[in-house]
Amino acid sequence: MIKTPPNNACTRRVGVGAFSGSLRGLELVPAKRRCLVPPQAGNASRSAHYLVFKIETRNSMAKLTRGEVEKILHDPNIRHSLTGADLADVDLNHMDLSSVDFRGTNLENANLQWTNLQNVDVRGANLKHADLRHANLLNLVLDESTQIDSKWYLVWDVYNHALPSRRDLQGVDMSGAYLRSAYLFADLRNADLSNCNLTAALLRFADLRNANLSNSDLRGARLTVADLRGANLTNAKLEDADLSGAVFNEDDL
């Protein structure tokens, strides 16, 4: 009997941990089993379990769900790379995504609220209309090829690049931003800073006249000599904030 060789032109099985390149053009479908990868030389004492995926060639990126992302990130034997994956519209809120490689990843309309994006690489990624409220953008790596809404680009810039001179941020919208311990020597008149995390933020000499600070967390913030006249402080948390020398209207508290 003549054996017909299997057609592997379109489908093949690999361990995700073996990836080092992009997932562009691939559809990622979890298999129902795991495979045992033989130990490498010099590491004969253990064998690594890798998630098995069926990868089929397509003209689009590999579409992943939240559950698949969690499996990849929780497996210690898998490199935390989601390069080129399609995560558009996926709900990733409250996930710790720190140090994950998202280069070229589609995150359009993704829910990234309360996520930890510290030290994440998003060069070439699409973050248009992504919800980044309360997301930690410290040391987020982006470049001119990153697509991100102007509001969140500003938040990223303010959080990561302290300027020695007063920054002009009059009337800007940074509502919902994560700015813990941020240096904000700035003109913030009429700015929207509502629902912000400003714990331990350095706001010395900041001009916050008529700024909206409602529902913001200012615990431990340094507001010495700040001008808070006309600022909306409704439901703002001010425990342990340093307000020495600050100017404000008592009616605003």
Image (tube, helix red, strand yellow):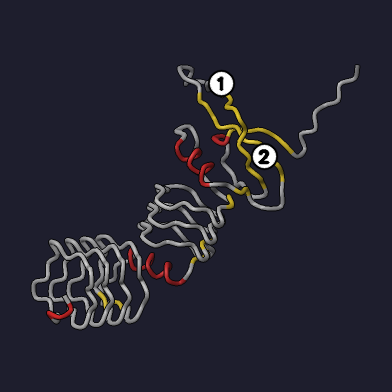
Residue at 49 percent of width and 56 percent of height: 122
Q: Which mark is residue 192?
A: none
Tell me if residue 129 comes above or below residue 110 in the rendering.
below
Give how far across and how far down residue 12 sits, in percent: 70, 34
Nearest to the eye among marks 2 and 1: give it: 2
Give how far across and how far down residue 192 sits, in percent: 33, 75
Q: Decide: few, some or many residues near mark 1? Use Cα within 10 Å; few <14, some 14-19, many ≥20.
A: few
Tell me if residue 61 comes above or below residue 220 in the rendering.
above
Disc nearer the start of the sequence (2/1): 1
Give how far across and how far down residue 52 sits, in percent: 60, 32
Give how far across and how far down residue 242 sits, in percent: 12, 67
Q: Nearer the viewer, residue 164 or 234?
A: 234
Residue linked to disc 1 = 38
User: Label 2 amino acid?
Assistant: Ile
Quadrant (top left/top right/bottom left/bottom right) for the N terminus: top right
Quick one: SS at disc 1? loop
Is residue 104 found left or right of 247 in the rendered image? right
Residue at 54 percent of width and 35 percent of height: 17
Q: Decide: few, some or many residues near mark 2? Use Cα within 10 Å; few <14, some 14-19, many ≥20.
A: many
Residue linked to disc 2 = 55
Tell me if residue 15 comes above or below residue 139 in the rendering.
above
The answer for how far apart the CA atoms under marks 2 and 1 are is: 21 Å
Residue at 29 percent of width and 71 percent of height: 163
Is residue 141 found left or right of 251 in the rendered image? right
Examine the image and state in which quarter residue 55 appears: top right
Tags 2 and 1 touching, CB below 8 Å: no
Quadrant (top left/top right/bottom left/bottom right) for the C terminus: bottom left
User: Label 1 amino acid?
Assistant: Pro
